[in-house]
Amino acid sequence: MTDLLDIIRDEIREAGPMPVSRYMALALGHPEHGYYTRQDPLGTDFTTSPEVSQMFGELIGAWAADVWHQIGQPKSFSLVELGPGRGTLMADALRAASGQPGFAAATRIKLVETSPVLTRVQQATLEPVVSKYGYMQPEWLTSIDALSEGPFIIIANEFFDALPIRQFVKMETGWHEQCVIDTNTGLALVPSPVPLREDVSLAGALAKAPTGAIAELCPAATAITSDLCSRIANTSGAILIIDYGYERSAAGDTLQAMRSGTYVPVLDQPGSADLTAHVDFQALADCAGEGVSAHPVTTQGKFLLRLGLAQRAEMLKQAATPDQAQTIDAALHRLTDREAMGTLFKVLAITAGRIEPAGV
Ligand code: SAH
């Protein structure tokens, strides 16, 4: 039994059934026992694209440098990453973009991270790159609220899938919030007995969902995206969101838990497994208000190949040993193949003004 399990049970005893969103927020972000608070899970529980190959972060660095050119090479702008993991993407991006004259001097690096453990890993990863290429010292923030100094170029890879979702079950009586209760045999998921009154946001495609259907909303994701959209609308810039998810809002249960690379039940030992949900890209694109454009969602495979992943792989292979060449080919395949990360992972670019983002 984990300490966090006790905490969750106590809260259910006092406050009643716990919405899935609260459970997910505690399991991932409890200040002491949360999954991300306690450890660096990358490489043990799951692997992300920047950890698969340096080429991923390099191409994103080139993408960011291109946006910087399109907004007129401002002398100062914020390069923001949400949930930077081990700092690998940012390090590769900074190295790749440093070849553009003036880029390093203009860049204010802002890392939005809640995990103290990962913040330390990011500091160690970025320190040598920052000093080698002449960037200013990065700034760490725990929330986007503290972001100032536009224009902004904002990157988020596998960040939105870690934000708490609400789940709803369609019953004869309407939509009911999915909640966690405590039973003799452990935690269990049950729909609240009382139907939702505020079912407005479950209209549209979900209005005709059959009985038994499950719908998900991620209020934190839409709140963050709307906030970032108004920041770029006011100052110019772009947002690049990469994650696994679906292009159009649809019913379906996508909440999943993973430990040591294996799926485990979502209520099993809270705080010890990564909990994620697929990202509803339509909901994020719909956050683009006046002065901001959401470009059509594309797949990670197409995006990376359009940015020149295959050519970059060839270049790296020219100086590689046969073993290294094999690793490069394997990474190319893993990042782009439909059976691997190429199709499930989607890319959404949101821009202000007349920017034509590369790759989408
Ligand atoms: N982008 C990285 C890591 C993805 S894992 C990569 O591609 O490798 C998710 C990251 O988001 C971790 O760094 C985690 O600590 C961070 N994170 C999760 N919830 C967060 C929140 N609410 N605010 C800021 N960072 C968060």
Image (cartoon, rainbow, N blue to C red):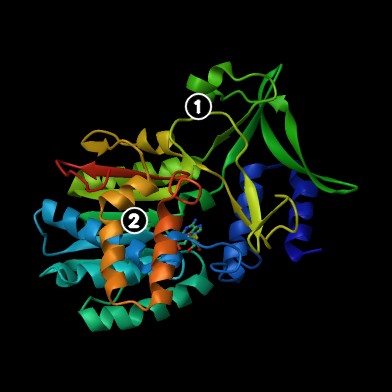
Q: Residue at x 20, y 36 (%)?
A: 291
Q: Residue at x 11, y 69 (%)?
A: 102
Tell me if residue 220 comes above or below residue 76 in the rendering: above
Query: x%, y% of residue 202?
Result: 53, 25
Q: In which quarter of the view is residue 82 placed?
A: bottom left
Q: Residue at x 25, y 60 (%)?
A: 311
351 vs 127, left or right, is left
Give the residue pinned by disc 2: 155
355 vs 359, left or right, is left
Q: How many residues crowd around disc 1 within 10 Å: few (fewer than 14), some, or many (20 or more)?
A: few
Q: How many residues crowd around disc 2 within 10 Å: few (fewer than 14), some, or many (20 or more)?
A: many
Image quadrant containing the C terminus? top left
Query: x%, y% of residue 158?
Result: 46, 54
Number of numbered tags placed on the structure image: 2
Give the residue pinned by disc 1: 201
Q: Earlier in the sequence, mark 2 or mark 1?
A: 2
Q: Nearer the viewer, residue 311 or 215?
A: 311
Q: Nearer the viewer, residue 230 or 45?
A: 45
Image quadrant containing the N terminus? bottom right
